[in-house]
Image: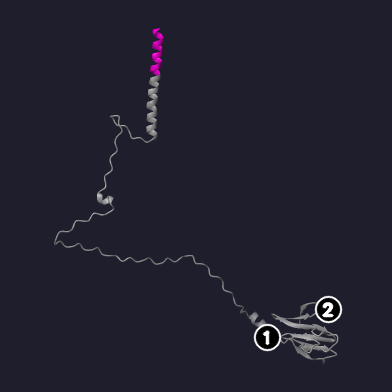
């Protein structure tokens, strides 16, 4: 009867011992993880040093006045004031590239071309006609209208010529001949044209019974 009681007491003692060790180990591990302060020789944690208490003047944000100098003492000389000069503006080393300026056409070839164009005298010379004398010259430098109507600049009183048959006009440095929807058509070097065509020196233009030669 006594032996079971002793055996149970031993087991209970071991359990209590293990619980005590477990609690100590857990306490140490918790202190280490929380950064607890080291325990002193007396078993209590060392108390941290109290921070110095700020003075009333510092806590209020005001500066305590300096003690007044004794009567008759010379006042301290003020320190020399150094003039502050603002730094000169720093120039950027990298400059934005300037846009290229258009180059004027001043070449000799351009001047020569303009000179030749201004010196040209485009004209229509009648080679053969039943209504106009052969050899008649019509200046067409600024353009001209050709037709049977008296309002035309080159009048051809021909039944095969429409009232407003064709026109010559300038575009840049070139002359063009345009048929204005005539009934019998306009021909350049034997070919009937439709719309506008550039004319060149030496070409023959046929309108009705009149044959012109374009010259410059």
Q: Position of residue 173 (x, y in %)?
A: 70, 81
Q: Residue furthest top?
A: 1
Q: Nearer the viewer, residue 57 or 36?
A: 57
Q: The N terminus appears in which quarter of the rendering?
A: top left
Q: Position of residue 194 (x, y in %)?
A: 80, 77
Q: Position of residue 186 (x, y in %)?
A: 82, 81
Q: Which residue is mark 1?
A: 118
Q: Position of residue 170 (x, y in %)?
A: 72, 82
- For the point 25% across and 49% down, which residue is it? 56
* Side of 203 relative to 71 (left or right): right
Q: Nearer the viewer, residue 5 or 214?
A: 5
Q: Residue furthest left?
A: 72
Q: Does any portion of residue 188 appear in the rendered image?
A: no
* Side of 174 relative to 130 (left or right): left
Q: Is residue 175 magenta?
A: no
Looking at the rendered structure, which numbered label has been put on residue 191? 2
Q: Nearer the viewer, residue 60 or 33?
A: 60
Q: Is residue 122 above or below residue 60?
A: below
Q: Is residue 146 above or below residue 93?
A: below
Q: Nearer the viewer, residue 205 or 200?
A: 205
Q: Are marks 2 and 1 in contact (CB under 8 Å)?
A: no
Element under label 1? helix
* Marker count (numbered): 2
The span from disc 2 to disc 1 (Cα, nearest Å) is 30 Å
Q: Main secondary structure of the magenta part?
A: helix
Element under label 2? strand
Q: Is residue 11 magenta?
A: yes
Question: Tag 1: Cα neighbours inside 10 Å, few (<14), some, or many (≥20)?
Answer: few
Q: Nearer the viewer, mark 2 or mark 1?
A: 2
* Range shown magenta: 1-14
Q: Earlier in the sequence, mark 2 or mark 1?
A: 1
Hey, which quadrant is residue 207 in on the image? bottom right
């Amino acid at each position: 009867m006594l032996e079971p009681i002793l055996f149970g007491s031993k087991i209970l003692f071991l359990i209590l011992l293990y619980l005590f060790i477990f609690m100590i180990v857990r306490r140490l591990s918790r202190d280490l993880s929380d950064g607890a302060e080291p325990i002193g020789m007396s078993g209590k944690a060392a108390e941290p040093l109290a921070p110095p208490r700020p003075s009333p003047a510092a806590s209020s944000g005001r500066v305590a006045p300096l003690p007044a100098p004794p009567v008759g003492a010379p006042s301290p000389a003020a320190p020399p004031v150094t003039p502050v000069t603002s730094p000169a503006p720093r120039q950027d080393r990298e400059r934005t590239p300037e846009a290229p300026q258009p180059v004027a056409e001043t070449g000799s070839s351009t001047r020569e071309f303009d000179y030749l164009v201004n010196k040209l005298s485009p004209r229509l010379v009648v080679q053969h006609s039943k209504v106009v004398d052969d050899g008649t010259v019509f200046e067409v430098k600024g353009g001209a209208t050709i037709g049977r109507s008296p309002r035309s600049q080159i009048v051809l009183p021909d039944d095969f010529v429409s009232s407003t048959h064709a026109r010559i006009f300038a575009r840049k440095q070139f002359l063009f001949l345009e048929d204005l929807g005539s009934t019998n058509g306009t021909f350049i070097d034997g070919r009937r044209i439709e719309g506008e065509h550039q004319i060149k020196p030496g070409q023959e233009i046929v309108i009705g019974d009149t044959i012109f030669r374009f010259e410059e």
